[in-house]
Image: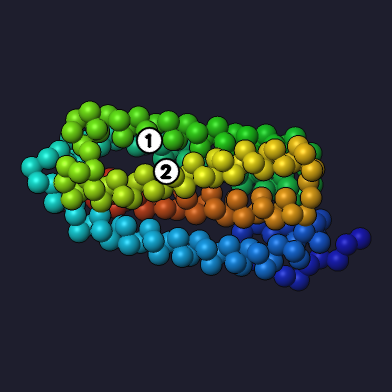
Amino acid sequence: MRRAPTQSYPGINLGEGHASAHKATEVVTFGFWVFLMSDLVYFGLMFAIYITMIDAQSGGPGPHELFDLKSIFAQTLILLTSSLTVGLAMLALKYNLPRARIVLWFGVTLMLGLSFLVLEIRDFLNMAAQGGIPQRSGFLSAFYGLVPLHGLHVASGCLWLIVLGIQLRMFGLTDLLMSRMVRLALFWHFLDLIWVGIITIVYFGGLTYG
């Protein structure tokens, strides 16, 4: 029987069922948390710029004309559900459930991420059709500096999922691959937290103070 690891890190620990992978993940997960916190600082700056630019519309279209709340609600529901599915994938990994279960939940997460991106890109195109382009006003420049940045992160997460799926097929469930899955899950949950900030500050804040 394997001895339970004494190390722990934020997020789902792999635990005694994957003792060697758990130990190897400890240091790199801490380093990944440092990266996420530096990314959070950058997002914080973009949020601050947006807040100061909400009313800098220069006579152009503003939040009330451009924001589609039904689409935003759908995107929120999709992204928050993807946080659940990536968590289920990590639980399947931790408790040594069949590999097909891990692939299933990561696959669902990928589909949800891509669906989110499709809706978001559609919103951007609709905004552009109404004159809501970045160069139109300070408000729109700040909006396009922040929201698509989050979308780019989601796209990166989707690409990461695809690469992990290919590596899983080629090399099997190695310690290195499990470590990468832990970091991907942290990254995905981080994106959901940022999206909550976008909903609150960008969309609701824009509609309230714009």
Residue drawn 68% across the image and 38% down it: 165
Q: Which image quadrant is residue 104 in?
A: top right
Snapshot quadrant of residue 11 = bottom right
Q: Local crowd at mark 1 within 10 Å, few (<14), some, or many (≥20)?
A: some
Given residues 88 and 118, the one toward you in this image is: 118
Residue denoted by label 2: 151
Q: How is the image coloured?
A: rainbow
Residue 150: image tag:
none
Which disc, if any, is residue 120?
Answer: 1
As drawn, 80 above or below 71: below
Residue at x-position 56% and y-position 41%: 159
**Of helix, strand and loop, which one carries label 2?**
helix
Q: Is the residue marked by circle 2 packed among few (<14), some (14-19), or many (20+) residues within 10 Å?
A: some
Residue 31 locus on image (x, y percent): 60, 67
Q: Residue at x 67, y 53 (%)?
A: 180
Residue 171 can be seen, yes or no:
yes
Determine the residue positioned at 25% across, 58% down: 49
Q: Please state which of residues 187 and 159 is positioned toward the viewer in this rendering.
A: 159
Whole-percent x, y for residue 172 in the image: 80, 43
- Left/right of residue 130 with respect to residue 202 in the rendered view: left
Q: Is residue 128 above or below residue 140?
A: above
Measuring from the top left, give residue 113's x and y in whole percent: 51, 37
Q: Residue type at mark 2?
A: Gly
Q: Residue furthest right?
A: 1
Secondary structure under the numbered disc 1 in the rendered image: helix
Q: Amino acid at mark 1?
A: Glu
Cβ–Cβ under 8 Å for marks 1 and 2: yes
Q: Quadrant of the N terminus?
A: bottom right
Q: What whole-number distance in Å separates the C-alpha atoms at marks 1 and 2?
A: 8 Å
